[in-house]
Amino acid sequence: MNGKTIINAGCSGISAVNIRGAEYIIVTVENGKFTVEERLVNFEPEKLKDKILKCGILEKDKVLMNLVYLHLVGRPDIKADFYHEAKDKMIERNRKLYRDDAKGIYKYFKLYDDDIWLELTEKYKQFFIL
């Protein structure tokens, strides 16, 4: 539209189909035509785990990093179950998937209540590795 191309490549690194591999794409535009090349980078789960532990990101969000790590090492079902349950609880409690007091960019994304996040963290922490 209007000479622009928008491509949503999904979430870099979290493959829906390739366990133990991070996917990305390269888009090349030449003479008004574009080609898309899919790439897969394999990684070793233990090295990824060590990097996560050393970089300090767990101090920011231990729950999210555990859910992402589990997805990457072959348990995407745990992350999916966590989010589906959070969505269902938001709708049950608030009849919508957002909070009225959300500000800025969070108005446009699903924002789960802290109490739901904490409740599900307690339920799912048995699966956490990090």
Image (cartoon, rainbow, N blue to C red):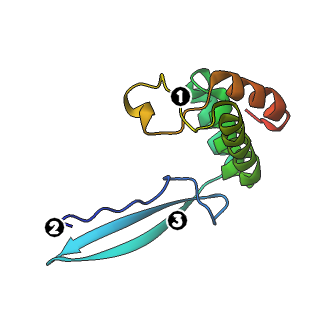
Marks 3 and 2 sit apart, C-alpha to C-alpha, by: 29 Å
Please state which of residues 116 and 97 is positioned toward the viewer in this rendering.
97
> Which mark lies nearer to you, 3 or 2?
2
Residue on which the image places disc 2: 3
Residue 89 vs residue 124: left or right? left
Q: Amino acid at mark 3?
A: Leu
> Which mark lies nearer to you, 1 or 3?
1
Residue 86 vs residue 11: left or right? right
Q: Amino acid at mark 2?
A: Gly
Provide residue 96's location: percent of width, then percent of height.
58, 38
Residue shown at 59% from the left, 59% from the top: 15
Asked which secondary structure carries label 3, the reply is strand
Provide residue 83's location: percent of width, then percent of height.
68, 43
In the displayed image of the protein, which residue is found farthest to the right? Answer: 126
Q: Label 2 near label 1: C-beta < 8 Å? A: no
Q: Amino acid at mark 1?
A: Arg
Residue 45 vs residue 106: left or right? right
Asked which secondary structure carries label 2, the reply is loop
Q: Quadrant of the N terminus?
A: bottom left
Please state which of residues 47 and 33 is positioned toward the viewer in this rendering.
33
Residue on which the image places disc 3: 40
Q: Quadrant of the C terminus?
A: top right
Marks 1 and 2 sit apart, C-alpha to C-alpha, by: 36 Å
Q: In this picture, is 92 found above or below 119?
A: below
Residue shown at 46% from the left, 25% from the top: 102
Q: Which one is earlier in the sequence, the residue at label 1 or at label 3?
A: 3
Residue on which the image places disc 1: 99
Residue shown at 55% from the left, 33% from the top: 111
Residue 71 is marked as none
Q: Which one is earlier in the sequence, the residue at label 1 or at label 2?
A: 2
Marks 1 and 3 sit apart, C-alpha to C-alpha, by: 37 Å
Please state which of residues 125 and 37 is positioned toward the viewer in this rendering.
125
